[in-house]
Amino acid sequence: MNNIMLIDDSPVFRETVKNILSRENFALSGEGSTADDAVKLLETSKTDLLLLDILMPGTSGLDIISGLKTKYPGLKILVVTALNQKPINDELSHLNVDGILYKPFDHDELVYEVNRILGN
């Protein structure tokens, strides 16, 4: 079973995504609301896929992606964001994220991307 971590500053969004993942039998290895939460949780949780928002209070998701990819080379990252702007998309491409899912998205889009990235 693949372990998925969810980092987003919106509790409503996190709850929605958790419900979708649960219905699809994915295990949640952790959740948080800041980039710092992601860094801390990854130290203690086996995680195959990180669902990461990029616009959060404090350190942004963009700021931690490169370091996470270096420290955890097998970690897959799916960015979930409402920001669909060329400069950000270009930066995400250079950071080699495994996918980008633009909010709002539906159940099927999320499940498809998670399965695609995890090779299911």
Image: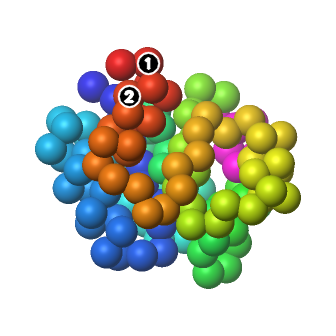
The answer to whether 66 appears left or right of 79 in the picture is right
| Label at residue 115 | 2
Disc 1 secondary structure class: loop
For image coordinates 57% across by 66% down, the residue present is 82
Disc 2 secondary structure class: helix
Image position, residue 67 (x, y; %): 75, 47
Q: CA distance from mark 1 to mark 2?
A: 6 Å
Q: Is residue 48 visible?
A: yes
Q: Based on the displayed image, in which of its 4 quarters is residue 61 positioned? A: bottom right
Residues in magenta?
65-72
For image coordinates 44% across by 63% down, the residue present is 104
* 13 relative to 100, above or below: below
Q: Disc 1 designates what residue? A: 119
Q: Residues within 10 Å of mark 1 (few under 14, many from 20)?
A: few
Image position, residue 17 (x, y; %): 31, 57
Q: Are marks 1 and 2 in contact (CB under 8 Å)?
A: yes
For image coordinates 77% across by 41% down, the residue present is 93
Tally of numbered discs: 2
The answer to whether 69 appears left or right of 27 in the picture is right
| Label at residue 12 | none
Q: Residue furthest bottom?
A: 57
